[in-house]
């Protein structure tokens, strides 16, 4: 299988790519790698798929946020993960459905806190949004594609 791993220079992405590489052709992509993609820049997602062609699977291990208290004085600091982690993965899926072969899959990444943590409220909102999005969009994706969301941690 030909698999794109996005976020492949991060801790989780590197481990996923390493594990898959023994049996599959893995294309590693990230903001800092040799094959660049940034989920906050939709054109970079288009360029990635234009360069790699059709694939069997896309796994997103990219995009993170930071712990930010609800009383943060800056809306931008509080909503930092919205563009990349939530909307970026939505844009990734919207583009991937045109490049993943019939019966292939797209896996997005949310997250989970075992217990509420100070500053985790926005992250919880984004993660819940991703989970709900994947659940709802699964009935819409074409050609037998599968859409998954995983929550490492």
Image (tube, helix red, strand yellow):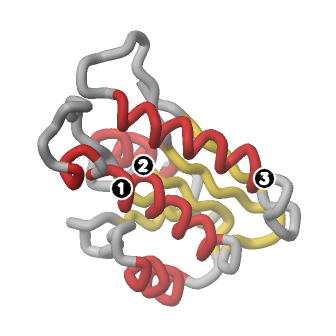
Q: Is residue 112 above or below residue 130?
A: above
Q: Give neighbour class at mark 1: few <14, some 14-19, many 20+ (Cα, 10 Å).
A: many
State the residue lying farthest toward the left: 73
The residue that label 3 is drawn on is: 138
Q: Position of residue 19 (x, y in %)?
A: 47, 42
Q: Which residue is mark 1?
A: 7
Tell me residue 119's x, y (percent). Answer: 25, 27
Residue in the image at 26% along x and 74% along y: 34
Query: Can you identify the residue that label 2 sits on?
Result: 61
Q: Residue at x 21, y 34 (%)?
A: 68
Q: Secondary structure at mark 3?
A: loop
Q: What residue is drawn where x is 36% and y is 59%? A: 84
Q: Secondary structure at mark 1?
A: loop
User: In the image, what residue occupies the spot 57% across and 61% down?
Assistant: 58
Query: Tag on residue 113?
Result: none
Placement of 62 over or under 132, stated as above or below: below
In this rendering, position of residue 60 left or right of residue 23: left
Vertically, is 26 above or below 61? below
The quarter of the picture where the N terminus appears is bottom right
């Amino acid at each position: 299988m030909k698999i794109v791993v996005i976020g492949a220079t991060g801790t989780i992405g590197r481990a996923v790519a390493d594990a898959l590489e023994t049996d599959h052709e893995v294309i590693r992509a990230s903001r800092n790698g040799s094959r660049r993609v940034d989920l906050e820049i939709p054109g970079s997602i288009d360029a990635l798929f234009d360069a790699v062609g059709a694939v069997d699977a896309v796994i997103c291990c990219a995009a993170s946020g930071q712990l930010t208290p609800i009383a943060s004085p800056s809306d931008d600091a509080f909503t930092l993960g919205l563009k990349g982690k939530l909307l970026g993965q939505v844009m990734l899926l919207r583009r991937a459905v045109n490049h993943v072969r019939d019966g292939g899959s797209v896996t997005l990444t949310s997250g989970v806190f075992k217990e509420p943590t100070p500053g985790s409220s926005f992250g919880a909102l984004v993660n819940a949004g991703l989970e709900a999005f994947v659940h709802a969009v699964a009935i819409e994706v074409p050609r037998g594609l599968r859409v998954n969301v995983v929550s490492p941690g």
